[in-house]
Amino acid sequence: MKIVSINAWGGAMYDELAAWLKSVDAEIICLQEVTRTPNRSGWATFADGERTLPQRLNLFDDVSAVLPGWTPYFVANDSGPVTGGDGAELRQDFGIATWVRDNCPVVGIDARFVHSRFVDYEDWSVDDRPRAALRLTVRDRIGDRSVSVIQLHGLRDPAGKQDNAARGEQARIMGAMVDQAQVVSDLVVLCGDLNLLPSSETFDLLREHGMTDLVGEADTRASSYPKPIRSASYLLVSSTGSVKSLEIVTEPEVSDHRALVLDI
């Protein structure tokens, strides 16, 4: 079974991302920074006072269209205004999504906020935006086991990736999700753009819940990301003996993050 995780950057490099996702041949695809604007398609401009970025209006539908043999699941963190290609102001939902190949029956679902609660913004906030996590438990028929995949986009703080009280609470909720997943699963995978340093106490806590980080201090940012701190995305497993390989994809570049590809 192959599991992919990547922060999709709102689809800013959509053509490259779509082509790569079609070629990667994964059973489970986890994307962070997924946009969704009902009944709209094409390009939009996102601005929060700190950044102005190109985004797809409906990355969720765009990716679903190029993955016809997968079932998609979307959870919105928050919602706010974007400007469509025609200049119209539109409401866009922003969150995470997981696509599961149709040969993997979904036998359990859990979604919860790890920071704050859903917010409908009049103007996007620069910091303290809500964050949700999504768990899907699937039946791996080839491996004759149940696998739970938890993904999230961790709290972003303009002050940096250092530990703080909010990230401590986020870690506590992540640990609780892992505990519940272990009750119904033979293997648990936790992945996503966690926005943490490798030295974060979050990894100590998750280790207490039986999870081992496979990424460590590896560079998970692409060349389009200019800042010096290169740690962002992580992937943890409850059993390292189940891991065949973990690839941190350097080529092709499909986002300002590098994709993580786990083979179990």
Image (spheres, rainbow, N blue to C red):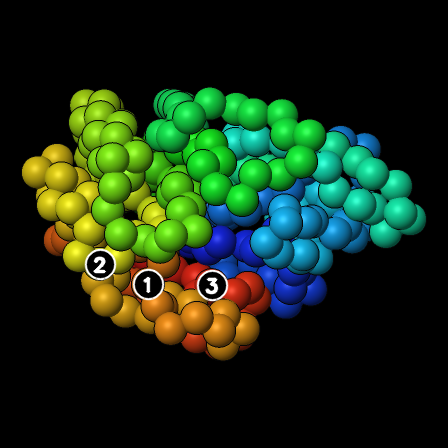
Instruction: Looking at this view, name the residue that lies furthest to the right.
Output: 86
**Is residue 212 in view from this perspective?**
yes
Left or right of 88? Residue 247 is: left
Tag 1: amino acid: Ser
Tag 2: amino acid: Pro
Q: Which residue is at a point 78% across and 52% down the rendered structure image?
A: 43
**Is residue 98 in view from this perspective?**
no
Q: Mark 1 points at which residue?
A: 231
Q: Which residue is at a point 52% across and 24% down the rendered structure image?
A: 118
Q: Do the residues labelled 2 and 1 touch (CB within 8 Å)?
A: yes
Q: Mark 3 points at which residue?
A: 257
Tag 3: amino acid: His
Regarding mark 2 in the picture, which secondary structure is present there?
Answer: loop
Regarding mark 1 in the picture, which secondary structure is present there?
Answer: loop
Q: Name the residue under label 2.
A: 198
Between the residue at mark 1 and the residue at mark 3, the CA separation in whole angstroms equals: 10 Å
Mark 2 / mark 3, whichever is N-terminal: 2
